[in-house]
Amino acid sequence: MTQPTNKTELLAEIERAHQDMVRYLASLTDAEKTAPILDEGWSIKDSLSHLVAWEKLTVDWLERSLQGEHVRRYVPGFIYNSPEEHEPVMLALNQHLYEQTRERALADVVQDFRAAHRAIYDFVTQMEERDIFDPDRFPGREGSPARDMIAGNTYGHYDEHLGWIQISRARLSNYPENKDELVRRVRERHAEMEALLATLPPSQMSAPELDGGWSVKDSLAHLTEWETLLIDWVGKYRRGEEVKRWAEGFLIDEGDAEAQMHRFNAHLYEKNRDLPLDHVLASYREMYAKVVALLTSLSEDEIYNPTHFPAREGRPLITLIVGDSYEHYDEHIGWIRVWLAKNPWQVGVAEFKFK
């Protein structure tokens, strides 16, 4: 994903990221938006307030810069004078902004969220190309074009927070109530991943920039392996065969389940890390199609009845399916978004941080 090189591209990215968040919010209830699911007890509502605050600050900085003022960020009482002070001052400012808005009603926050987006979009629309992209336009920015600040506090910031939200929600149990809804969620998350992949050149998909030195390609191979296991396990349950997880050599009855899973994931990573990107993409898409076909073939009773498969010892199949399909997608999409939001290929010099 490359940085915008003109105002049209920049505005398109700002709108794209805003709509990504809007679509995701539309899939949540008000209770889900206000639940304290993020780090340090933040809610999705708090994330939105945080995004609003930084968009408002950005418009203020841009306005004053265009009027010839040498702008010192962040705000009175939270000014840093050296690189060493930058991080603690920013964390303190973010906590201050959180305390200011934490009690606001969801409806008011959502209204501000829409208005702040429109305000910064309209402001950038009126800016000259030179004001946005010339690194020497504002001496106080020390060679960094205004584009970097705009990107960091609009689409880059949105992508980072949406990533954290998706990671957090992937860890919550919120199962669809019927098979149609289950298949819909799987299709939607796959489409979301495909849309994300469409923005990345092959070199970026293969770059070892995620946690643990993984690449986007490694994430896709990982998803493929677990979907392959899902299909195998469900097939065995349906045939009445014994299911041993995770795999031979990594059986959870031989020790701690989480430790065994981490060992197994490391094994899968080593197994697939040298595969060419084209091969990984083809396998990933093929296995997704097989998962959809499998889910379509299952009955509601097979999915939801906790006693349908005695070998599952009272656990409905839905818990297995969700964990290895759309929740797994959510988690990896979230990690990729967070990485991209911080990646200089996308936003240049980052000018924001969540807490």
Image (cartoon, rainbow, N blue to C red):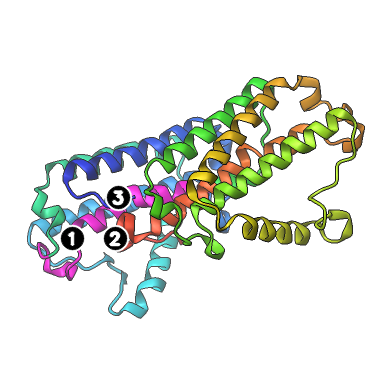
Query: Of helix, strand and loop, which mostly describes the magenta segment?
Result: helix
The local secondary structure at tag 2 comes to loop
Tell me the SS state at disc 3. Answer: helix
User: Height in image: 134 above or below 319?
Assistant: below
State which quadrant residue 269 falls in.
bottom right
User: What type is the residue that disc 1 sits on?
Assistant: Pro
Q: Is residue 224 left or right of residue 197?
A: right
Query: Which sits in the foreground, 131 or 184?
Result: 184
Residues at discs 3 and 2 in contact (Cβ within 8 Å) = no
Badge 2 is on which residue? Answer: 348
Tell me the crowding category of disc 3: few under 14, some 14 to 19, or many 20 or more residues within 10 angstroms, Cα based. many
Magenta segment includes 156: yes
How far apart, in angstroms, are the residues tagged by discs 1 and 2? 9 Å
Vertical comparison of 101 with 177: above or below: below
The quarter holding residue 77 reads bottom left
The stretch of residues the image draws in magenta is 136-164
At horizontal 28% and vertical 78% (from top left) the residue drawn is: 81
> Residue 245, percent across and down?
81, 48
Specify which label sits upstream in the sequence, 3 or 2.
3
Depth order, front residue of 241/178? 241
Dot 1 or dot 3, earlier in sequence: 3
The numbered disc on residue 55 is 3
Q: Are marks 1 and 2 in contact (CB under 8 Å)?
A: yes
Residue 145 got which mark?
A: 1
Q: Locate residue 302, reporting x and y percent.
A: 80, 24
At numbered mark 1, what does the secondary structure look like: helix, strand or loop?
loop
Label 1 vs 2, first from the N-terminus: 1
